[in-house]
Image (spheres, coloured by chain):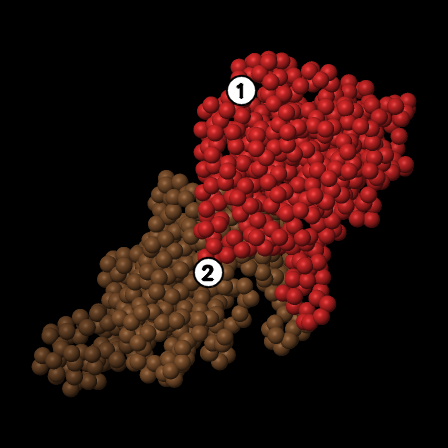
Chain colours: A brown, B red
Amino acid sequence: MKYEDAIAKYDPVIGIEVHVELGTATKMFDAAPNTFGGGPNTNVTPVSLGLPGALPAVNGKAVEYAVKIGLALGCEIAESCRFARKNYFYPDVPKNFQTSQYDEPIAFDGSVEVELADGEIVTVPIERAHMEEDAGKNTHVGGSDGRIHGAQHSLVDYNRAGVPLVEIVTHPIVGTGERAPEVASAYVRTLRDIFKALDVSEARMEQGNVRADINVSLRTSPEAPLGTRTETKNVNSFRSIERAVRFEISRQAAILEAGGSVLQETRHFHEDTGETSSGRVKSDADDYRYFPEPDLVPVEPARAWVEEIRSTLPELPAQRRRRLLGEWGFSELEMRDVINAGLLDPIEETVTLGASPAAARKWWTGEIARLAKQDEAEPTQLATPAQVAELAGLVEAGKLNDKLARKVLAGVAAGEGSPSDVMSARGLEIVEDTGALEAAVDQALADNPDVVEKIKGGKMQAIGALMGPIMKATRGQADAGKAREMIMAKIGG
Amino acid sequence: MTDTPQNRGTSQNADAPQNTDTPQSSSAQQTADLTRLTAVELSAGLRAGDFSATEVTRAHLDRIEQVEGTVNAFITVTGDVALATAAEVDRKRAAGEDLHPFAGVPVTHKDLVVTSGITTTAGSKILADWVPPYDGTVYRRTKAAGLPLLGKTNLDEFAMGSSTEHSAFGNTTNPWDTTKVPGGSSGGAAASVAAFESPFSVGTDTGGSVRQPAAFTGTVGVKPTYGSVSRYGVIAMASSLDQVGPVARSVIDAAALHQILAGHDPHDSTSLPGEVPDFLAAAQQGASGGALEGVRLGVVKQLAGKGYEDGVSAAFRSALDLAAAQGAEIVEVDCPSLGYALDAYYLIMPSEVSSNLARYDGMRFGLRVEPEDGPVTAETVMAATRAAGFGAEVKRRIILGTYALSAGYYDAYYGSAQKVRTLVQRDFAAAFEQADVLVSPTAPTTAFGFGAEKSSDPMALYLGDVATIPANLAGIPGMSLPAGLSEGLPVGFQLLAPAHEDARLYRIGAGLESALDSARGHSLLAQAPEL
């Protein structure tokens, strides 16, 4: 069914589980290094391999990171919480149970504000954030495209087994209507930005540091009870999240329209087709036989420690945005452009170095962004905040006009040094030699008697018609203000 | 140094160097004498230079060679490992280097303790050929103290059983009567000590697995406070109940071994922080006399009388009388919730077992069995491996535990059992207001014959753990020491102390032991028949 038709008939409800791999030095429960890459089964200890007799011991840094995430999401931090065993047989889970948290998560009851592309703010309610360990990675050999179906044998790499994760679970997100796909994607992007700001994870989607499971269900109206949901696992890019939600809404609507019922199941998203398909059914997935992990004592984050962490939390993206909007006087639209272009950091630094917010925004989102696009580079690769601040200062002081400043920037981008270096090397300073300027003005007045008449008649804007010839004569280096003064003096006198 | 599966079994080490300092020491007479000494006596003799660690170790290996055919206390004998450690101790002693006071006194570990390079089976077919790549903390500690490892002792598969008959490596016999079981699951540990194959042994106790075999074999067995000894590298049965403990021929020797094993281990988050109390000093103080004067012994109403064999009750009562004659005050205490302890234990234990034993699936280590027909998938290999590798008792407990943890049953079973556990702890706390230690017979019976545990209703045998299980549920320390004989078989006397009061057990236990030995004129084991 077409998405527009599906949305017209049904009210979508989404729920998102985000897993983030923490950037701790070691794993969640043992001293094996927590690093990406390396030969198969090299970053392992008896604990991460689940050898007989091995016991877990909680990584204190991982608890600290989980508390940071919980606080950043406005959650309560549990005074005492426990780990639990989630029992199921699968070869990538070395103990055949995952050590996770079940009924006692470390953080709960929070919310996060998510900004959509048009500036609309949606508040996403957070149910909980809990700690757990990652599983290993299966590789199926001999079948088509690496799938288990038709494979001759499978290999397991336990390097990832035991990597610390925090899983963040939302309450059902209601009332988003046709914007559900956008909200899902923006929510995960917001979390990703928070993880980066907190410095608790590399938070690289393409490396699988952040993974999202997307629940979607439909109901006939916002008053109706929740419908049956599907869970699309491991969607790994913002765009895919949006597409997956969109596809599921259309797919489920078609089923419901045909009088069928949606099957509660795990589904997989396919990047190539943009579709989801029914996932594998684990044989004993229905009952994980959770029980408190007897090998670990409860985790009891001391209140003073939690408050200490709270006091050292960095400014989060939403707070910063709000603060800078106030400080800089940008419009919502201007601020959104800056954020979407990824230029908030360099602009803030440029302002810190003395440039006006308007000038910093103008140069970064204007000429530098244009040059970057043309060179297929990042703006920050072409200029530094210090260079831009210097450039803005030169314009402010009247040593450069906009046109000259653009030329200076081209030189800076080409690696010719600081703006003042480029200015002197290329001879781009505004001409202050009144003799040369006066000659150019006199010539322009002589060549355009009709314009002179207009000015005399009080049409001041006609002065603009003289500026072109003057700039041409001075190769653009004339100070427009001075030229204007001179014209007025000559005509008036 | 490694010991591979090929040289499992009793090994002779004819090629090992003789100790040239004491050429006369290898006489058969002295060899026999060395195995009769307690660990404390061996420690003193080694330090005095009366004999070398190599001689002590060789004497025990000879004894093992002599009696193992009858006793079968070991799954693996590690003669090469033991002699290498002994030679190293002798070298260090000759060089005047610092040594642990018990360096050179041999030890055995239950085959549940993970030993790098030495096959570790847990008594199961599923791990029959598993050679671990790391050391359990308790093995690391005995190695660091310079205790030569004589071997790995037999046990009920994954420590599940009370007779050691549930081992995949044959029955161990009771040195008092080889037609009887040695108890279990640390039956090999207890038998090796009772048969003078080892001065002391490391066992584990989940519901009485150290104390009951100690009772059956006339030895001393201790289950320390939960967390006193690290469980890292001890193959888990039921994590919240398992505790490593010593088996020895005297309370002082048990204290000495506990001292070596105890201490905080960052690898086991349930291990106790802080300083280890001086157990050995407490035992020595208790043995020096007067330890029972004014001590209140609380006889637990629920753990005496009904259900206990007459001979067991009689031996227990006469030990109590002796204690009273030494100045102890006998009080009766009531712990009503102990009536539910067994039920709670048989829900919590199998629940944890079902999860702990999930990792034995043929994927990473140990036995791997492919299905005879049908597709070979991870799932079918796991099923075939577990079907072939686990014994009946292990399977029974996995099934029980899987059921008890199932959705919809958790609250009724595991949840309720945890509540009982809290009640047991409260009852004990109240009882310890009235008594310094609580006492009972260790087991309702003396050692039973082979086949009894396997053939009869398992419920009847589960009842044999009624007196030992409460200590595991509550996490408190317990000790069994020999009270006397009933129809020629040893009877165990159990003492329980509050959590973290293990030293109290050693002090009072050593006092009672020395009173019993004095009354008898010798230790009970001196009466054991020659093998």
Query: Residue A289, percent across and down?
Result: 51, 56
- Give neighbour class at mark 1: few <14, some 14-19, many 20+ (Cα, 10 Å): some
Q: What amino acid is at disc 2? A: His
For residue B216, which quarter of the picture? Answer: top right
Residue A246 visible here: no
Locate the N terminus of chain A and report the quarter of the image it occupies.
bottom left
At mark 2, the secondary structure is strand
Image location of residue B95, percent across then percent down: 78, 25
Q: Regarding mark 1 in the picture, which secondary structure is present there?
A: strand
Local crowd at mark 2 within 10 Å, few (<14), some, or many (≥20)? Answer: many
Where A368 sits versus B265, above or below?
A: below
Q: Residue at x 76, y 47 (%)?
A: B169
| Pointer 2 residue | A19
* Residue type, numbered disc 1: Ile
Chain hosting mark 1: B
Q: Position of residue B250 (x, y in %)?
A: 69, 24
Q: Position of residue B352 (x, y in %)?
A: 56, 48
The chain letter for the residue carrying disc 2 is: A
Q: Residue furthest bottom?
A: A450
Image quarter where the C terminus of chain A lies is bottom left
Name the one closer to the observer, B116 or B122.
B122
* Disc number for residue B330: 1
Whether residue B285 is situated above or below residue B418 in the rendered picture = above
A378 shown above or below B157: below
Say if A116 sits above or below B198 in the image.
Answer: below
Report whether A458 appears left or right of A238. Answer: left
The single residue placed furthest to the left in the displayed view is A457
Q: Residue at image x 75%, y 35%?
A: B174
Residue A344 badge: none
Picture residue at 41% right of the left edge, 76% below the top: A262
What's the CA distance linking mark 1 and mark 2? 61 Å
